[in-house]
Image: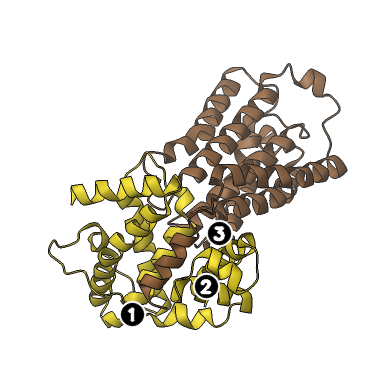
Amino acid sequence: MDTDQLIRSLAADNARRAPRVGAVLTMALLVAAPLSILIFATFLGVRADVMSAMRNPFFDMKFAVTLSLAIPAIIVSLHLSRPEALLRGWGWLLLLPVGLLAVAIGSEAMLAPAMPMTMRLMGKNSRTCLMAIPAMSLPLLAGALFGLRHGAPSNPALAGALAGLVSAGLAATLYASHCTDDSPLFVATWYTLATAVVTAIGAAVGSRVLRY
Amino acid sequence: MRGREDEWTGLMRSAMAGDDAAYHRLLKAVTPVLRAAARRGLARAGQPPDQAEDIVQEILLAVHLKRHTWDSEAPFAPWLFAIGRNKLIDALRRRGKRVFVNIDDFAETLPGEAPQETASAGEVAAQLGTLPQRQRDVLQSIAVEAASIKDTAAKFSMSEGAVRVALHRGLAALTAKLRDH
């Protein structure tokens, strides 16, 4: 087939309209979310003292941190789904949770906390955290990768890593309502480790499936 | 250069609004520029220029299937050249070449470059043969025989909707095969 002939067939297909990447990503995440919620409801559940925990600003802070990861990651991943897009100028959005955590760690240190630092950091749930966040991330990661396949990222591994951050941020939001460790030191250590695992998986899978 | 790129952006806007003729004109207009850039990129990698047409066709298919990622407020050329660069890098990698794609291969086209005649490429033609019969028939009819969707539908006693679906699926399948082979 010569190129003029190919062009003729492309022009004949012009009526076909594809939805925007954002719409497909949203749908895919909405389809995947019930699976992650099912894992949450089956194995974890909301912590028993949630009503009193909500009066603890460090409990609330966990959600601020996880959502400040998930939402910017969605925004940046949609930006990067355009072929000419660069991370430059957008990457700082991904530092929001880091900044929030730094502020939280600082405020906790100034409040003369009840427990010593190592106990706050180690907590009681580190192992659960390391398993639960990646497990709940997997359906969401699959959804995010499916949604981003609709785009045309110039760096598939980077886009996959962003999909990992999206899914880990959302899964960590669920997990935060289960976990009784509220210290920002715990969050900075174990949530970060769990997120790193999911991000690495996302980058590895993305480098294969996000090529267009 | 500037004027040319503004013209492309205008044509793409019309195309996205449903003007098939504008879309056809746009793809014809960008093809010689893509071809020249692909040749330059191949030459830089020490590759024979005869593979350029395969790369051009891959770029055109990607442009078509990913055009919803173009922001109609943004200029068209940077978007187009980003896809071109990506496909050139892919093609060189597949041939096991260390890739040094010069950013400017696509961004700058030497003025006065003669637009070349259309050329055949081996890979699309080869992959065409692996498509399901119906998709191949429809593609052949529309591309090679220049039949309209309506005439193609009559020829194969299909509905026009079914022709459109087969055409789109065929193009998507071709793109996937070129990417993964």
Q: Position of residue A82 (x, y in %)?
A: 44, 49
Chain A, chosen colour in render = brown
Q: Quadrant of residue A4?
A: bottom left
| SS class, disc 1 | helix
* Crowd tier of the residue under label 3, counting other residues whose Cα lies within 10 Å: few below 14, some 14–19, many 20 or above: many
| Tag 1: amino acid | Gln
Q: Which residue is mark 2?
A: B139
Depicted B166 relative to depicted A157: above or below: below
Name which residue type carries label 3. Answer: Gly
Q: Which residue is mark 3?
A: A206
Q: Colour of chain B?
A: yellow
Quarter assignment of residue B157: bottom right
Query: Tag 2's secondary structure?
Result: helix
The residue indicated by pointer 1 is B51
At label 2, the amino acid type is Leu
Name which residue lies at 41% across and 83% down: B122
**Along the viewing direction, whichever of A139 and A196 lies nearer the viewer:** A139
Disc number lying in front (3 or 2): 2
